[in-house]
Image (cartoon, helix red, strand yellow):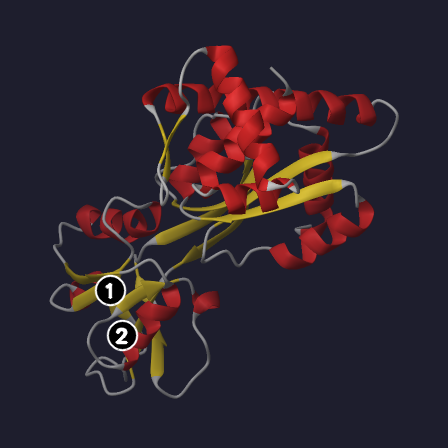
């Protein structure tokens, strides 16, 4: 069994198409197909179910895939560690960023990192804080920017507070509350809200604040994008609670501080167990950027 065969299996599992998998691996389709067939013959099991239109992992393929990824990660880490011993930073840096990250300029940092360490392949992933924490614990991600309630700090990973801020109420300029200089949570309890999906860390910040105040609220709209939230607010359909930095300065919206409102903490998180040379180099770079 060769590492190249494992790369082909991972590519085909993720692309679910021989043509795209071959292009991703920079080989001709016939070579990729032959190598996967040879691996299946060696293992004595079918890793993929194939038809003229579909390619899917079999149960054996599902079981094999996690080990294939782990083997590739271990091989890549071995090369990176050997290079680091000679002062070179190589390998892969996988970074997760929540949609509402504002404490650090992630694109600028990644650009600076790339210029300093051009041999490192950078991967950027969007998503939620819980998924990022799980990925860091499992060794699938190096560092991530998280957004959590101040009552639920990250566990099982190393972390550093980047920023702490209170969410503000966002209403349309036509809303009856638009002229208020400050609100209480009770003032918002009868409003229809837009928020992140139930159970997500972005939603938990506001849910915990209302629960602590003994108040119920109606989240009528659940979306994953702060931009879409603001568009719904502009239409006068809902109100929102968001970090001030993600709210544009525009005539259609009003932002209002909320007494005892939800507190959001932005964290930088990374593995508590043997971070890669690329991860350590990135963390060294982030330090000066956040003072």
Mark 1 closeness class: few <14, some 14–19, many ≥20 residues within 10 Å: many
Residue at position x 68%, y 26% in the image:
76
Q: Which mark is residue 194?
A: 1
Query: Which quarter of the picture shows residue 86?
Result: top right
Could you say where residue 235 lies in the image, as x and y percent from the top left? Answer: 25, 81
In the displayed structure image, the side of residue 218 where residue 20 appears, left or right = right
Q: Could you tell me which residue is drawn at 36 percent across and 42 percent down?
A: 54
Instruction: Look at the numbered discs 2 and 1 and tell me whether their residues touch, using CB distance below 8 Å.
Output: yes
Q: In the structure shown, which secondary structural element does the residue marked by tag 2 occupy? A: helix
The answer to which of marks 2 and 1 sits earlier in the sequence is 1
Q: Position of residue 190 (x, y in %)?
A: 11, 67
Residue at coordinates 82% horizontally, 26% vertically from top-left?
83
What is the secondary structure assignment of the residue under circle 1?
strand
Query: Which residue is disc 2 drawn over?
Result: 232
Q: Give the answer, above or below, for where 85 lies relative to 113.
A: above
- Indicate which disc residue 66 carries: none
Horizontal side of residue 77 vs 189, given as left or right: right
> Crowding near pointer 2: few (<14 within 10 Å), some, many (20+)?
some
- State which quarter of the image contains the N terminus: top right
Q: Is residue 130 above or below residue 79?
A: below
């Amino acid at each position: 069994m060769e590492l190249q065969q494992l790369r082909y299996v991972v590519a085909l599992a993720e692309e679910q198409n021989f043509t795209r998998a071959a292009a991703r691996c920079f080989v001709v389709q016939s070579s990729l197909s032959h190598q996967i067939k040879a691996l299946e013959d060696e293992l004595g099991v079918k890793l993929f179910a194939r038809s003229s239109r579909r390619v899917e992992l079999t149960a054996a393929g599902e079981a094999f895939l996690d080990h294939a990824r782990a083997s590739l990660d271990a091989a890549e880490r071995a090369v990176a560690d050997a290079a680091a011993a000679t002062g070179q930073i190589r390998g892969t840096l996988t970074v997760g960023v929540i949609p509402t990250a504002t404490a650090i300029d992630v694109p600028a940092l990644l650009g600076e990192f790339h210029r300093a360490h051009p041999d490192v392949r950078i991967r950027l992933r969007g998503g939620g804080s819980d998924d990022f924490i799980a990925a860091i614990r499992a060794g699938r991600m190096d560092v991530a920017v998280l957004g959590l309630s101040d009552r639920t700090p990250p566990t099982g990973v190393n972390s550093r507070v980047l920023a702490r801020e209170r969410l503000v109420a966002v209403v349309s300029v036509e809303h009856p509350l638009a002229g208020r200089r400050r609100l209480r949570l009770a003032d918002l309890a009868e409003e229809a809200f837009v928020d992140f999906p139930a159970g997500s860390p972005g939603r938990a910040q506001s849910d915990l604040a209302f629960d602590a105040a003994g108040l119920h609220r109606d989240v009528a709209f659940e979306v994953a994008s702060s931009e879409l939230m603001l568009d719904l607010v502009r239409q006068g359909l809902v109100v929102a609670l968001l970090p001030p930095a993600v709210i544009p300065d525009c005539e259609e919206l009003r932002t209002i501080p909320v007494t005892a409102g939800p507190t959001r903490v932005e964290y930088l998180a990374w593995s508590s167990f043997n971070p890669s040379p690329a991860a350590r180099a990135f963390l060294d770079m982030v330090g000066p950027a956040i003072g």
